Amino acid sequence: MTLQVLYFAWLRERIGLGRELVETNATTIADLVEELRAREDRYAAAFADMTTVRAALDQELVPLETPLGSAREVAFFPPMTGG
Amino acid sequence: MTLQVLYFAWLRERIGLGRELVETNATTIADLVEELRAREDRYAAAFADMTTVRAALDQELVPLETPLGSAREVAFFPPMTGG
Amino acid sequence: MTDFAPRIVVTQDDFDLGAEAEALEAGPDTGAVVTFTGRVRNVADGLHHMEIEHYPGMTERALTEIAEQAAARWPLSGITVIHRYGALRPGARIMMVATASRHRDAAFEAASFLMDYLKSRAPFWKKEVTGAGADWVDAKDSDEDALARWSDTGT
Amino acid sequence: MTDFAPRIVVTQDDFDLGAEAEALEAGPDTGAVVTFTGRVRNVADGLHHMEIEHYPGMTERALTEIAEQAAARWPLSGITVIHRYGALRPGARIMMVATASRHRDAAFEAASFLMDYLKSRAPFWKKEVTGAGADWVDAKDSDEDALARWSDTGT
């Protein structure tokens, strides 16, 4: 399937782009991370420490083990620091 | 001694004045209340239920048993309802 | 204990919340400003106005003392307390408190503390005037009880 | 659950706290309005500006969901949440929340709840830009911990 994948804050900076279309057969967000990591060093660097990475599926904050299901948008970002 | 005595809210309304000079030999605020009560019905009415009366000595909230000492100003009022 | 003087105002006039908050925001280390505004609600049987009486002299002393307690207890960079008296129509602002701090929790807690103490320890009395007459507002036990939550952490 | 829509604004522009609070005061049964304003503090090594990034679309959803949780939990008559993004200089306002209620405790608690959830659950990220470079602000464990206090009283 084709997913819109978004990156924010230092994940965006390390990967070097804010969004991209990804063709994947991953079943969970964590699987997708593995696929991205295997692609290029910049992804491996961005996803080096997953304790500092959060994910949203179709704009809803979810755990990394969440199945992708029929989602169209996955986002990766560090813990939020608003307010 | 001569005390400035002030009344607020419904105490002021029942007694019919906001302040007066009182000549007294009372040693505590409670003694002063007894003297005032004995004076006239309007004082007796104002001081009928002391659970709803608070007092300040020289503008400091204090218990009714407090000695008058060298205070110059005593105030009587219901529990506060500001804010 | 503190490097600022609390701003205490007892007045018949309305106030400008935005300007008051902005004044507290000034200073390099203020990250958080909390304000509370109290307003005359309409009562069931049609309030004409609220009459607020106070004890000139003691009012300013009591408010200053409460502000100083808050300043001793939380790391604040500013405190403002404004309370009106006289006749106030439904919808009118009655009072405000505002606190400034580096920390949001300090600003929130101090503002809540100021309100709790102001309610039961500052010499103001409210009277509701309706078409049916005038009644002094009774103090609520819950307002007195609210003070208890501040006593266990010591001052 | 509620008879009002929360006002949620995500913007590059500054806001007018006084006007926002006044809008919330309207309505016959609002007795209490609490506001919180967050502002860019200067940091030790001289902050040039703070850069705030957000996730358009998700931001508005997350803020609306947080506001709806607050409205379901406390008897409120209004909620406003405004958060800015982009480059903000020291002293600039970053965001505000405001709550209106009959009851002061509800207004205080709901505003505090909104802040705690906004800090850790709304997709904003802050970067501090100084003469020495640029650093993303780390999330604080204490911000995540702050959510725990709201979980025992249920929604």
Image (spheres, coloured by chain):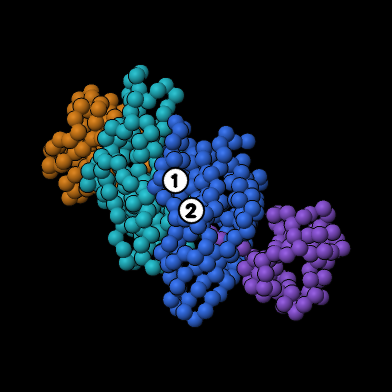
Chain colours: A orange, B purple, C blue, D cyan
Residue located at (20% from left, 41% from top): A26
Residue D57: which numbered mark, if any? none
Identify the residue under disc 2.
C96
Residue located at (69% from left, 64% from top): B19
Q: Residues within 10 Å of mark 2 (few under 14, many from 20)?
A: many
Identify the residue under disc 1.
C20
Q: Is residue C86 left or right of residue B32?
A: left
| Residue in front for this viewpoint, D38 or A74 | D38
Say how many tags the image has.
2
Secondary element under disc 2, as helix, strand or loop, is strand
Q: Amino acid at mark 2?
A: Met
Q: Are marks 1 and 2 in contact (CB under 8 Å)?
A: yes
Secondary element under disc 1, as helix, strand or loop, is helix
Query: Which label's residue is closer to the chain start, 1 or 2?
Result: 1
Farthest top residue in view: D132
Residue located at (50% from left, 68% from top): C50
The answer, for residue C2, to whether it is visible in the render is yes
Image coords of residue B17 (percent x, y): 67, 69
Image coords of residue C55 (percent x, y): 63, 58
